[in-house]
Image (cartoon, rainbow, N blue to C red):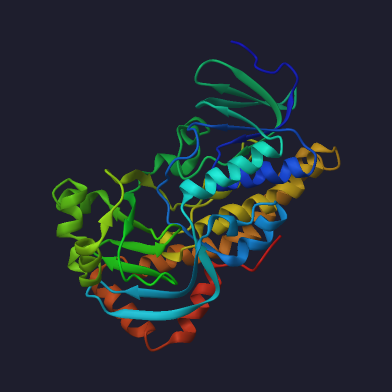
């Protein structure tokens, strides 16, 4: 095998999504050499809702990556429908913005390249920690190897790396799959994010740049099978039973030839530190899409990890203290959000319960606002 860099790299980031790109930008801004390994070349689409809470704006601006340059949609209202179409509406305390991952990830990538971050476009095959050398050895699929003092795992919801690392959640099959594409729909309010429930699933729709909408939904393999085994049949037989979704599906122009699909989405608890890797973003814990805050949490995770990582790289913090501080800080910042997210998802599992919950919350706006605050954070930099 060829050791790509015989000198140990300071920081290696595995995955170039929001968490990885933000962490790389932040570390580079603190004077550290950073290498990011990403499987795909930018720009590309990801299965992801594309609403971002405004809590991230101070951080992105500090990184020199103000998303205003992308002309995102400004979103300040929330609507939720039951499977029968009963509607709940509420303002969003902080509000947010809508921008595609296709545009936002590429924007952050370009900023990272300009900041001196190095990128390797390859698949990671193996990660091992060598205690005697106090380093990680990362093997790429083509046989090249990278040695690094610190590795951040920012590779998203699920990866073959999770199997290789023996992460407990990976052995538990998940029934969930996600589907996403962009639409155009004349008359859709661009300041609103909508979530529409259907049997064993829910769909989100919100505006992004260029007069487009992101349409993304979570459902189950059983729903797909019951709907005829195709996405088109699923949407026609299952999603369209919600009259609000039926109207969207009937009148929207689809902008993808084929939707993006991801399988085995797991909301099981994960650990923020695994075999001396700091896990950041969805690799550390995935909040249910119903809560609409996954992108903000990915960025916040980077903001939490990087100051500690920088101290470690400067020799100011030993590895055990780094890992303990990060794990404690991660749980303090995100543990409650994830637990509340799983509980909220359970309230919308079936049509009868969903109708009762939406019907009750329509008359209890304070409870709706409280749930939102439990799954969102405060502005951070």
Left or right of 375 on screen, residue 173: left
Q: How many labels, in total? A: 0
Q: Position of residue 140 (x, y in %)?
A: 54, 22
Q: Is residue 20 visible?
A: no
Which residue appears farthest toward the right when viewing the image?
316
Q: Position of residue 352 (x, y in %)?
A: 24, 74
Left or right of 361 on screen, residue 110: right
The structure residue drawn at horizontal position 57% and vertical position 42%, both measured from the top left corner, is 154
Left or right of 149 on screen, residue 192: left
Left or right of 379 on screen, residue 356: left
Q: Position of residue 164 (x, y in %)?
A: 49, 30
Which residue appears farthest toward the bottom when viewing the image?
363
The structure residue drawn at horizontal position 74% and vertical position 33%, both measured from the top left corner, is 33
Q: Is residue 213 visible?
A: yes
The structure residue drawn at horizontal position 59% and vertical position 41%, both measured from the top left corner, is 109
On-image quarter of the C terminus: bottom right
The part of the image, by quadrant, that contains residue 153 is top right
- 83 or 333, nearer to the observer: 83
- Residue 68 against residue 114 in the figure, above or below: below
- Residue 124 against residue 226 in the figure, above or below: above
Q: Position of residue 303 (x, y in %)?
A: 68, 53
On-image quarter of the N terminus: top right
- 261 or 281, nearer to the observer: 261
- 256 or 277, nearer to the observer: 256
- Residue 30 against residue 201 in the figure, above or below: above
The structure residue drawn at horizontal position 62% and vertical position 61%, both measured from the top left corner, is 56
């Amino acid at each position: 095998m060829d050791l790509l860099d015989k000198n140990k790299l300071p920081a290696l980031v595995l995955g170039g999504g929001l968490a990885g790109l933000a962490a790389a930008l932040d570390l580079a801004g603190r004077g550290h050499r950073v290498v990011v390994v990403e499987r795909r070349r930018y720009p590309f689409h990801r299965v992801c809702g594309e609403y971002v809470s405004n809590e991230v704006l101070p951080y992105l601006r500090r990184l020199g990556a103000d998303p205003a340059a992308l002309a995102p949609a400004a979103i300040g209202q929330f609507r939720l429908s039951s499977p029968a179409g009963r509607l709940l509406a509420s303002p969003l305390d902080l509000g947010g913005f809508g921008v595609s991952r296709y545009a936002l990830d590429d924007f952050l990538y370009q900023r990272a390249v300009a900041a001196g971050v190095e990128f390797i476009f390859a698949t990671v095959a193996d990660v091992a920690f060598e205690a005697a050398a106090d380093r990680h050895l990362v093997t790429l699929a083509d046989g090249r190897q990278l040695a690094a003092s610190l590795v951040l795992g920012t590779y998203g919801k699920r990866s073959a790396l999770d199997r290789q690392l023996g992460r407990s959640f990976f052995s538990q099959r998940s029934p969930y799959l996600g589907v996403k594409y962009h639409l155009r729909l004349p008359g859709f309010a661009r300041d609103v994010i909508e979530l529409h429930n259907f049997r064993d699933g829910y769909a989100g729709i919100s505006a992004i740049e260029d007069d487009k909408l992101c349409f993304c939904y979570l459902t189950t393999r059983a729903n797909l099978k019951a709907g005829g085994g195709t996405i088109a049949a699923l949407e026609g037989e299952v999603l369209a039973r919600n009259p609000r979704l039926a109207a969207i599906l009937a009148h929207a122009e689809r902008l993808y030839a084929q939707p993006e699909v991801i399988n085995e989405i797991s909301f099981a608890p994960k650990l923020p530190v695994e075999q001396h890797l700091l896990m950041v973003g969805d690799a550390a814990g995935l909040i249910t899409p119903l809560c609409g805050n996954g992108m903000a949490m990915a960025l916040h995770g980077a903001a939490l990890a990087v100051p500690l990582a920088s101290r470690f790289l400067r020799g100011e913090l030993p590895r055990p203290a780094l890992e303990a501080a990060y794990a404690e800080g991660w749980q303090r910042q995100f543990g409650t959000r994830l637990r509340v997210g799983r509980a909220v998802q359970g309230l919308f599992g079936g049509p009868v319960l969903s109708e009762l919950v939406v019907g009750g919350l329509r008359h209890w706006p304070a409870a709706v606002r409280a749930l939102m605050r439990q799954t969102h954070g405060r502005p951070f930099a």
